[in-house]
Amino acid sequence: MTDFIDYPDTDMMMLQVARTLSRDLRNALGRRERVVFAVPGGSTPGPVFDLLAAADLEWARIDILPGDERWVPEDHARSNARLIRERLLRDKAAAARLIPLWRPLPAPSDAMAEVNAALSDILPIDVALVGMGADMHTASLFPGADNLELALSDDAPAALPIWAPGADEPRVTLSARVLSEAYALHVLITGEDKREAYQKARKLSPNEAPIAAILGDATVHWAP
């Protein structure tokens, strides 16, 4: 059952989410030799990353996995890997290992065999943090995306190419199956529009509201 935590402001939410993720990662390190931590791109999680980077964890045993990626080089301004390197992989967390979804190939489809082979060596995800858009997408699971049906299916590959309506570039995304199998799954959202979108998503099918595919045992963190 989905838990919904309502915070009075974003500062308190970011602090508490960072603490919760630190706890979940520490617990995972007690269970497994290597731990997989899936994280989102975008601007919303930045403050959580800033706080988490200083956490006293065995970061050298943690693999950081983007939940999705635009098909752009890792030094591109729109690269999620770049954001993760700049905001999370510093301070104590600099010892963690980034597992990129991008490869220097023309299109995501050219790289999926290699990407999925790499993911098969590290999955399942131990701790996942995802966001949600006002359109009820998560990762790059967008309503109306060209490969959405496969991405939502029970037999979907771990990662697959996807093109969102109106997007400037193709993307690669983790499938709903892989995200929902995370041992601990947290959804981070802010603003009244996102709260309304979350409430709406609970009543819709995953095809209409892809976030619905992973809400099962997730904890949703919201602040105005």
Image (cartoon, helix red, strand yellow):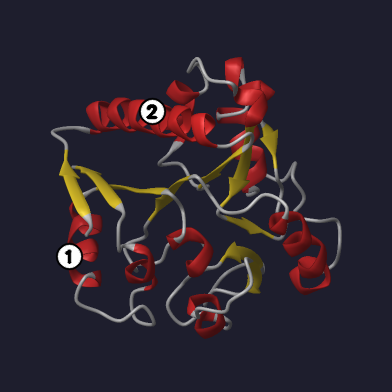
| Residue 205 horizontal/vertical position (percent) | 30, 81
Amino acid found under the numbered disc labelled 1: Gln
| Residue 17 horizontal/vertical position (percent) | 33, 33
Q: Quadrant of residue 75?
A: top right
- Name the residue furthest right: 105
Q: Is residue 184 above or below residue 105?
A: above
Observer-nearest of 171 and 38: 38
Residue visible at 54% across and 74% down?
Answer: 164
> Which residue is under mark 1?
199
Crowding around mark 1 (Cα neighbors within 10 Å: few <14, some 14 to 19, many 20+) is few
Q: Is residue 122 left or right of residue 15?
A: right
Q: Is residue 12 visible?
A: yes
Residue visible at 50% across and 45% down?
Answer: 126
Q: Is residue 107 visible?
A: no
Q: Secondary structure at mark 2?
A: helix
Q: Is residue 176 above or below residue 152?
A: above
> Which residue is under mark 2?
23
Q: CA distance from mark 1 to mark 2?
A: 28 Å
From the image, state whether disc 1 or disc 2 is nearer to you.
2
